[in-house]
């Protein structure tokens, strides 16, 4: 089947859109994996200082 110039342009545009979508999805998965690693490596918040209650010995 011989494609006209217009059909070739449309096919090229659709291929570009599909490649762009695939790259965006790959980047999204890569960023999600990186975010999980960052969350795991983040330091835990410091524990609050203990409060000593007064002991009434009356």
Image: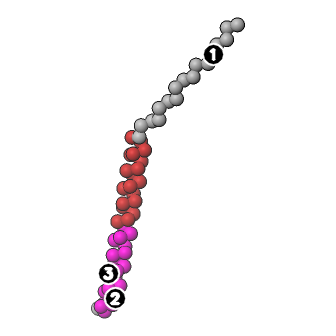
Q: CA distance from mark 2 to mark 3?
A: 9 Å
Q: Is residue 39 magenta?
A: no
Residue assigned mark 2: 7
In the displayed image of the protein, which residue is found farthest to the right?
58
* Quarter of the figure with residue 2: bottom left
Task: Please say if 50 is above or below 31.
Answer: above
Question: Mark 3 or mark 1: which is in front?
Answer: 1
Tag 1–tag 2 contact (CB < 8 Å): no
- Secondary structure beneath disc 3? helix
Q: Is residue 16 magenta?
A: yes
* Quarter of the figure with residue 53: top right
User: Could you tell me which residue is drawn at 34 percent across and 88 percent down?
Assistant: 7
Task: Please say if 18 is above or below 39.
Answer: below
Q: Which residues are magenta?
A: 3-22
- Secondary structure beneath disc 2? helix
Near mark 1 (Cα within 10 A), the count class, few <14, some 14-19 or many ≥20, is few
User: Could you tell me which residue is drawn at 35 percent across and 65 percent down?
Assistant: 23
User: How far from the left and from the top, in percent, is residue 30?
Assistant: 36, 56
Q: CA distance from mark 1 to mark 2?
A: 85 Å
Task: Report the disc number at residue 54.
Answer: 1
> For the stretch drawn in magenta, what is the main secondary structure?
helix
Near mark 2 (Cα within 10 A), the count class, few <14, some 14-19 or many ≥20, is few
User: How far from the left and from the top, in percent, is residue 19?
Assistant: 34, 71
User: Could you tell me which residue is drawn at 34 percent across and 77 percent down?
Assistant: 15
Residue assigned mark 3: 12
Residue in the foreground of this view, choosing between 45 and 26: 45
- Secondary structure beneath disc 1? loop
């Amino acid at each position: 089947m011989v494609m006209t110039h217009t059909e070739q342009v449309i096919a090229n545009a659709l291929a570009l859109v599909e490649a762009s979508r695939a790259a965006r999805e790959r980047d999204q998965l890569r960023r999600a994996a990186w975010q999980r690693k960052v969350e795991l490596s983040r330091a835990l918040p410091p524990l609050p200082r203990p409060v000593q209650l007064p002991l009434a010995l009356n």
